[in-house]
Image: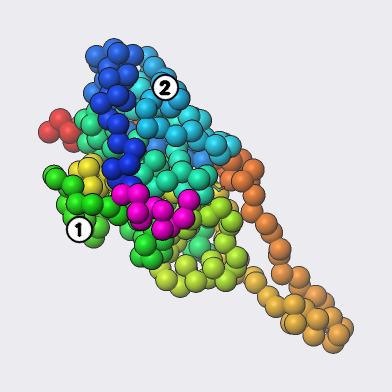
Amino acid sequence: MSIISERTQAPSLAVESFAGTLDVLSRILPARLLKPRVAIVCGSGLSTLASSLRDVVEVPYSSLQGFGKSTVEGHRSALAFGLTGEGDGIPVVAMLGRFHPYEGHSLSTVVYPIRVLARLGVRDIIITNAAGSLNPNLDVGTIVSIQDHLALPNLTGFHPLLGPTRPNYPRFLPLSTAYSRPLRRLVFLAAHALRLPRDALAEGTYAWVSGPSYETPAEGRFLSAAGADVVGMSTVPEVLAAREEGINVCVLSLVTNKVVIPEYKSVREEVQAELAGKAIERAPEAEVSHEEVLSVGKQKAEVMKSLVAKLIELIAAEQEK
Ligand SMILES: O=P(O)(O)O[C@H]1O[C@H](CO)[C@@H](O)[C@H]1O
Ligand SMILES: Nc1nc2[nH]cnc2c(=O)[nH]1
């Protein structure tokens, strides 16, 4: 998959086979689950976000035309339809696993499920991810409500909305209000209702990179200097497709590791200190791993789950107004 082939394949049109997908869903799902009002995208290690749903019907991606297969550990490959909240319940759909371009998926495949969710009637989407911290104030375990993004791939031609103009879609999508302010407000109200500690939830900007390598320290400093607080390899294409489809977007990043390590010191300083007989303060040389990312996801699963469940309740109440 090269940028050129992405450009020339008219990505937004290539794999659209909505009728088939919707037909399968309408045959499998009971009527009360077929029209979800809110969707969740579960990030790396966060599939348990859907475990608070009841009356769940899981539909494997393999049975849905146009869907790829998630190949990353910590991502399953199914849609989970279910209910949350009291009484009749609020119909919700969760993507248990997403697609990343680094897996070899085209950008059109990456965003295809979002377009299907739009056709099911989803009006609000909560997109979650695991991310590295670029901001010294954001510690591992912090949940970050994303208010903006910095997407170098988009600015340099790797963009999910490239392709011929389509009827009923904006040619030039504005993004200045992509991260819904009303939904971000509800995130903080949900945290308040749950009495989460003040530092459990922060606000910040997400940098999208293609991966699959993690950042070098210099890349981390670069993204931080450019204004990003956390970095990850997903989410932004989904946000763009959701906005193009008219869905309100809320993004929650779980900080799973630090990318910018403030104590960074040069080897030269270390050697000079050593030669001068001074005590050597070695720079930490930690390496991030996907196992570490998944393990933080596991540790924080409960708090993420309760925040998302409360947020859905508040969203549903707003939808009813
Ligand atoms: O963004 P999600 O899918 O949560 O996953 C994040 O974790 C993986 C790296 O550990 C990358 O895929 C990165 O994007
Ligand atoms: N690019 C990137 N993605 C991540 N996902 C979880 N942690 C990281 C990280 O440090 N960098």
Residue 265 vertical position relative to residue 196 in the rendered view, above or below: below
Closest to the observer: 199 or 96?
96
Residue at (40, 32) in percent of width and height: 67
Ligand 1 within 8 Å, label 1 CB: no
Q: In which quarter of the image is residue 93?
A: top left
The residue shown at (64%, 54%) is 288
Q: Residue 172 carries which label?
A: 1
Q: Which colour scheme is used?
A: rainbow
Residue 308 magenta:
no
Q: Residues within 10 Å of mark 1 (few under 14, many from 20)?
A: few
Q: What stretch is highlighted in magenta?
A: 1-10
Let me know if residue 5 is in the magenta part.
yes
By secondary structure, the bulk of the magenta-drawn segment is best described as: helix
In the picture, the disc for residue 63 is 2
> Does residue 82 appear left or right of residue 232 in this picture?
left
Amino acid type of disc 1? Phe
Q: What's the mark number on residue 317?
A: none
Looking at the image, residue 278 lies above or below residue 13: below
Position in image of residue 82 (x %, y %) = 35, 20
